[in-house]
Image (cartoon, rainbow, N blue to C red):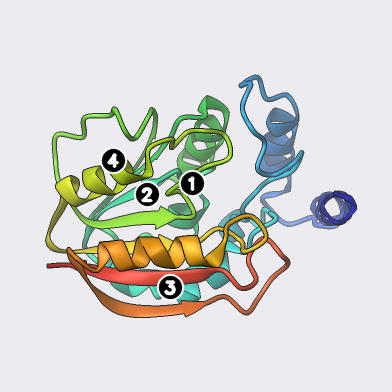
Amino acid sequence: MKIVKFINLYYKLLHIINFDKHRNFRKELIKFNNSKTADLYDYGEGMFYQSIPPIKLNGLRNSHKRIKILKLNNYLLDKTVLDIGTNIGAIPLSSEKNFKECIGIDHNSDVIEIANKVKDYLGIEKLKFICGDFLKYNFNKKFDVVLSLANHSTFDKGIEDTNYYFQKIEEILIEGGILILESHSPLYEDPSSYLNLVEMLKNNYEIIEHGYYEFGNFYDKKRKFHIFKKK
Protein backbone atom coordinates (compact mmCIF):
# COMPACT_ATOMS: atom_id res chain seq x y z
CA MET A 1 0.00 0.00 0.00
CA LYS A 2 1.38 3.40 -1.01
CA ILE A 3 0.24 5.12 2.19
CA VAL A 4 2.09 2.54 4.33
CA LYS A 5 5.29 3.08 2.34
CA PHE A 6 4.92 6.83 2.85
CA ILE A 7 4.37 6.45 6.62
CA ASN A 8 7.36 4.11 6.92
CA LEU A 9 9.57 6.50 4.94
CA TYR A 10 8.49 9.38 7.19
CA TYR A 11 9.27 7.43 10.38
CA LYS A 12 12.63 6.30 9.05
CA LEU A 13 13.49 9.93 8.40
CA LEU A 14 12.45 10.87 11.96
CA HIS A 15 14.69 8.17 13.38
CA ILE A 16 17.63 9.52 11.37
CA ILE A 17 17.23 13.18 12.33
CA ASN A 18 16.40 12.60 16.00
CA PHE A 19 19.71 12.85 17.91
CA ASP A 20 18.46 11.94 21.40
CA LYS A 21 20.25 9.49 23.71
CA HIS A 22 18.40 6.46 22.31
CA ARG A 23 19.45 7.08 18.70
CA ASN A 24 22.17 4.41 18.48
CA PHE A 25 19.96 1.82 20.13
CA ARG A 26 17.12 2.55 17.69
CA LYS A 27 19.59 2.16 14.81
CA GLU A 28 20.46 -1.28 16.20
CA LEU A 29 16.78 -2.25 16.35
CA ILE A 30 16.10 -0.96 12.84
CA LYS A 31 19.08 -2.89 11.47
CA PHE A 32 17.86 -6.07 13.15
CA ASN A 33 14.29 -5.50 11.96
CA ASN A 34 15.52 -5.15 8.39
CA SER A 35 17.33 -8.49 8.63
CA LYS A 36 14.48 -10.50 10.17
CA THR A 37 14.70 -14.23 9.56
CA ALA A 38 11.28 -15.58 10.57
CA ASP A 39 9.08 -16.47 7.59
CA LEU A 40 6.00 -14.82 9.09
CA TYR A 41 3.59 -12.05 8.15
CA ASP A 42 5.17 -8.62 8.63
CA TYR A 43 2.54 -6.48 10.37
CA GLY A 44 4.82 -3.46 10.15
CA GLU A 45 5.33 -3.98 6.41
CA GLY A 46 9.04 -3.24 6.66
CA MET A 47 8.95 -0.93 9.67
CA PHE A 48 7.68 -1.31 13.25
CA TYR A 49 4.01 -2.12 13.74
CA GLN A 50 3.82 -0.37 17.13
CA SER A 51 5.64 2.57 18.66
CA ILE A 52 7.70 2.46 21.87
CA PRO A 53 7.67 6.04 23.25
CA PRO A 54 10.24 5.46 26.06
CA ILE A 55 12.94 5.06 23.40
CA LYS A 56 11.21 7.33 20.85
CA LEU A 57 10.74 4.42 18.45
CA ASN A 58 8.02 5.22 15.93
CA GLY A 59 5.56 2.67 14.61
CA LEU A 60 2.44 2.38 12.50
CA ARG A 61 0.28 2.20 15.66
CA ASN A 62 0.39 4.74 18.49
CA SER A 63 1.10 2.85 21.75
CA HIS A 64 0.89 5.95 23.97
CA LYS A 65 -2.63 6.88 22.86
CA ARG A 66 -3.84 3.26 23.07
CA ILE A 67 -2.55 2.99 26.64
CA LYS A 68 -4.24 6.27 27.55
CA ILE A 69 -7.70 5.53 26.11
CA LEU A 70 -7.70 1.99 27.55
CA LYS A 71 -6.63 3.38 30.95
CA LEU A 72 -4.09 0.58 31.11
CA ASN A 73 -1.94 2.15 33.78
CA ASN A 74 -4.95 1.99 36.11
CA TYR A 75 -5.91 -1.57 35.22
CA LEU A 76 -2.35 -2.93 35.40
CA LEU A 77 -1.45 -1.41 38.78
CA ASP A 78 0.01 -4.13 41.05
CA LYS A 79 -1.47 -6.87 38.83
CA THR A 80 -0.14 -10.00 37.16
CA VAL A 81 -0.61 -9.43 33.45
CA LEU A 82 -0.54 -11.46 30.24
CA ASP A 83 -0.18 -9.69 26.89
CA ILE A 84 -1.19 -12.11 24.11
CA GLY A 85 0.37 -11.44 20.72
CA THR A 86 2.69 -8.89 22.26
CA ASN A 87 4.61 -8.26 19.00
CA ILE A 88 7.66 -6.15 20.02
CA GLY A 89 6.23 -5.74 23.52
CA ALA A 90 5.28 -2.14 22.81
CA ILE A 91 2.27 -1.95 25.15
CA PRO A 92 3.88 -3.23 28.38
CA LEU A 93 7.17 -1.51 27.53
CA SER A 94 5.38 1.80 26.97
CA SER A 95 3.15 1.61 30.04
CA GLU A 96 4.12 2.98 33.45
CA LYS A 97 5.30 -0.58 34.20
CA ASN A 98 3.46 -0.43 37.54
CA PHE A 99 2.33 -4.06 37.26
CA LYS A 100 3.46 -6.73 39.71
CA GLU A 101 4.53 -9.01 36.87
CA CYS A 102 3.87 -9.08 33.12
CA ILE A 103 4.38 -11.77 30.50
CA GLY A 104 4.19 -11.04 26.78
CA ILE A 105 3.86 -13.97 24.38
CA ASP A 106 4.15 -14.10 20.60
CA HIS A 107 4.94 -16.95 18.21
CA ASN A 108 7.24 -14.76 16.08
CA SER A 109 10.80 -15.19 17.35
CA ASP A 110 12.04 -11.99 15.69
CA VAL A 111 9.60 -9.62 17.41
CA ILE A 112 10.26 -11.35 20.74
CA GLU A 113 13.99 -10.82 20.25
CA ILE A 114 13.34 -7.10 19.69
CA ALA A 115 11.10 -6.98 22.78
CA ASN A 116 13.82 -8.57 24.91
CA LYS A 117 16.46 -6.18 23.55
CA VAL A 118 14.31 -3.20 24.61
CA LYS A 119 13.47 -4.77 27.98
CA ASP A 120 17.16 -5.30 28.74
CA TYR A 121 18.05 -1.83 27.47
CA LEU A 122 15.49 -0.26 29.82
CA GLY A 123 16.43 -2.62 32.67
CA ILE A 124 12.91 -3.93 33.38
CA GLU A 125 13.11 -7.07 35.53
CA LYS A 126 9.41 -7.80 36.18
CA LEU A 127 8.64 -8.15 32.48
CA LYS A 128 9.16 -11.41 30.58
CA PHE A 129 8.77 -12.11 26.87
CA ILE A 130 8.12 -15.63 25.59
CA CYS A 131 8.28 -17.01 22.05
CA GLY A 132 5.48 -19.55 21.92
CA ASP A 133 2.02 -20.55 20.75
CA PHE A 134 -0.52 -19.13 23.21
CA LEU A 135 -3.02 -21.89 22.42
CA LYS A 136 -0.50 -24.59 23.39
CA TYR A 137 1.60 -22.86 26.04
CA ASN A 138 1.25 -24.03 29.66
CA PHE A 139 1.51 -20.97 31.90
CA ASN A 140 1.08 -22.90 35.18
CA LYS A 141 -0.57 -19.84 36.72
CA LYS A 142 -3.53 -17.50 36.48
CA PHE A 143 -3.52 -13.80 35.72
CA ASP A 144 -5.31 -10.74 37.10
CA VAL A 145 -5.41 -9.05 33.69
CA VAL A 146 -5.26 -10.43 30.14
CA LEU A 147 -4.64 -8.16 27.16
CA SER A 148 -6.14 -9.39 23.89
CA LEU A 149 -5.36 -6.44 21.64
CA ALA A 150 -6.48 -7.28 18.10
CA ASN A 151 -5.32 -10.83 18.57
CA HIS A 152 -8.50 -13.00 18.63
CA SER A 153 -7.82 -13.88 14.99
CA THR A 154 -4.61 -13.12 13.13
CA PHE A 155 -3.47 -12.76 9.53
CA ASP A 156 -0.33 -14.78 10.17
CA LYS A 157 -2.48 -17.70 11.40
CA GLY A 158 -0.96 -17.53 14.88
CA ILE A 159 -4.51 -17.83 16.24
CA GLU A 160 -6.59 -20.23 14.17
CA ASP A 161 -9.26 -21.27 16.70
CA THR A 162 -11.01 -18.21 18.13
CA ASN A 163 -13.41 -20.22 20.31
CA TYR A 164 -10.59 -22.13 21.99
CA TYR A 165 -8.65 -18.87 22.27
CA PHE A 166 -11.33 -17.34 24.50
CA GLN A 167 -11.86 -20.60 26.36
CA LYS A 168 -8.19 -20.64 27.32
CA ILE A 169 -8.29 -16.98 28.37
CA GLU A 170 -11.20 -17.77 30.68
CA GLU A 171 -9.26 -20.67 32.19
CA ILE A 172 -6.16 -18.61 33.02
CA LEU A 173 -7.99 -15.47 34.20
CA ILE A 174 -8.81 -15.26 37.91
CA GLU A 175 -12.40 -14.80 39.09
CA GLY A 176 -13.09 -11.07 38.89
CA GLY A 177 -10.14 -10.68 36.55
CA ILE A 178 -10.00 -8.14 33.72
CA LEU A 179 -9.99 -8.94 30.00
CA ILE A 180 -9.13 -6.02 27.71
CA LEU A 181 -10.26 -6.67 24.15
CA GLU A 182 -9.50 -4.65 21.03
CA SER A 183 -10.90 -5.14 17.54
CA HIS A 184 -8.99 -5.21 14.30
CA SER A 185 -9.28 -2.22 11.99
CA PRO A 186 -12.74 -2.17 10.34
CA LEU A 187 -10.85 -2.31 7.05
CA TYR A 188 -9.80 -5.86 7.94
CA GLU A 189 -12.53 -7.12 10.29
CA ASP A 190 -16.28 -6.79 9.82
CA PRO A 191 -17.42 -4.76 12.86
CA SER A 192 -20.43 -7.06 13.23
CA SER A 193 -18.09 -10.05 13.66
CA TYR A 194 -16.31 -8.30 16.51
CA LEU A 195 -19.63 -7.38 18.16
CA ASN A 196 -20.73 -11.01 17.88
CA LEU A 197 -17.66 -11.93 19.93
CA VAL A 198 -18.61 -9.31 22.50
CA GLU A 199 -22.12 -10.79 22.78
CA MET A 200 -20.64 -14.25 23.28
CA LEU A 201 -18.30 -13.02 26.01
CA LYS A 202 -21.18 -11.39 27.90
CA ASN A 203 -22.19 -14.89 29.03
CA ASN A 204 -19.15 -15.04 31.32
CA TYR A 205 -18.09 -11.42 31.64
CA GLU A 206 -19.50 -8.05 32.64
CA ILE A 207 -18.66 -5.08 30.41
CA ILE A 208 -16.99 -2.32 32.44
CA GLU A 209 -16.09 0.09 29.66
CA HIS A 210 -16.20 0.27 25.89
CA GLY A 211 -15.51 2.73 23.10
CA TYR A 212 -13.56 3.25 19.92
CA TYR A 213 -10.38 4.97 18.77
CA GLU A 214 -10.60 8.42 17.20
CA PHE A 215 -6.87 8.90 16.63
CA GLY A 216 -4.10 7.82 14.32
CA ASN A 217 -4.10 6.48 10.78
CA PHE A 218 -6.24 3.64 9.44
CA TYR A 219 -4.31 1.13 11.58
CA ASP A 220 -5.97 2.58 14.71
CA LYS A 221 -8.89 4.80 13.77
CA LYS A 222 -12.40 3.42 14.45
CA ARG A 223 -11.17 0.29 16.22
CA LYS A 224 -13.54 -0.75 18.98
CA PHE A 225 -12.48 -1.86 22.45
CA HIS A 226 -14.21 -3.49 25.41
CA ILE A 227 -13.03 -3.98 28.97
CA PHE A 228 -14.58 -6.99 30.69
CA LYS A 229 -14.67 -8.28 34.25
CA LYS A 230 -14.94 -12.04 34.66
CA LYS A 231 -18.09 -13.06 36.55
Q: Quadrant of residue 221?
A: bottom right
Label 4 amino acid?
Tyr
**59 and 172: which is toward the camera:** 172
Label 2 CA crowd tier, 10 Å (few <14, some 14–19, many 20+): many
Marks 3/4: CA–CA distance: 25 Å
Q: Are marks 2 and 1 in contact (CB under 8 Å)?
A: yes
Q: Which residue is mark 4?
A: 164
Residue 60: % across, % down: 70, 56
Q: Is residue 86 left or right of residue 188?
A: left
Along the polypeptide, which appears first: circle 2 or circle 1? 2
Kind of residue at badge 2: Asp
- For numbered disc 2, what is the local secondary structure? strand
Marks 2 and 1 sit apart, C-alpha to C-alpha, by: 8 Å
Label 2 sits on residue: 83
Which is in the foreground here, disc 3 or disc 4?
4
Q: Name the N-terminal-most of marks 1 and 3.
A: 3
Whichever of labels 3 and 4 marks the residue nearer the N terminus, that label is: 3
- As helix, strand or loop, the secondary structure at mark 4 comes to helix
Looking at the image, which is closer to me, 75 or 119? 75
The residue located at (56%, 68%) in the rendering is 223
Residue at 46% over, 80% down: 211
* Residue 172 in picture, x, y percent from top left: 18, 46
* Circle 3: residue type: Leu
Residue bearing the label numbered 1: 89
Dot 1: element: loop
The spot of residue 9 in percent (x, y) is: 88, 50
For marks 2 and 1, give the one nearer the viewer: 2
Could you classify mark 1 by the number of other residues whose Cα lies within 10 Å: few (under 14), some (14-19), or many (20 or more)?
A: many
Instruction: Tell me the crowding category of disc 4: few under 14, some 14 to 19, or many 20 or more residues within 10 angstroms, Cα based.
Output: few
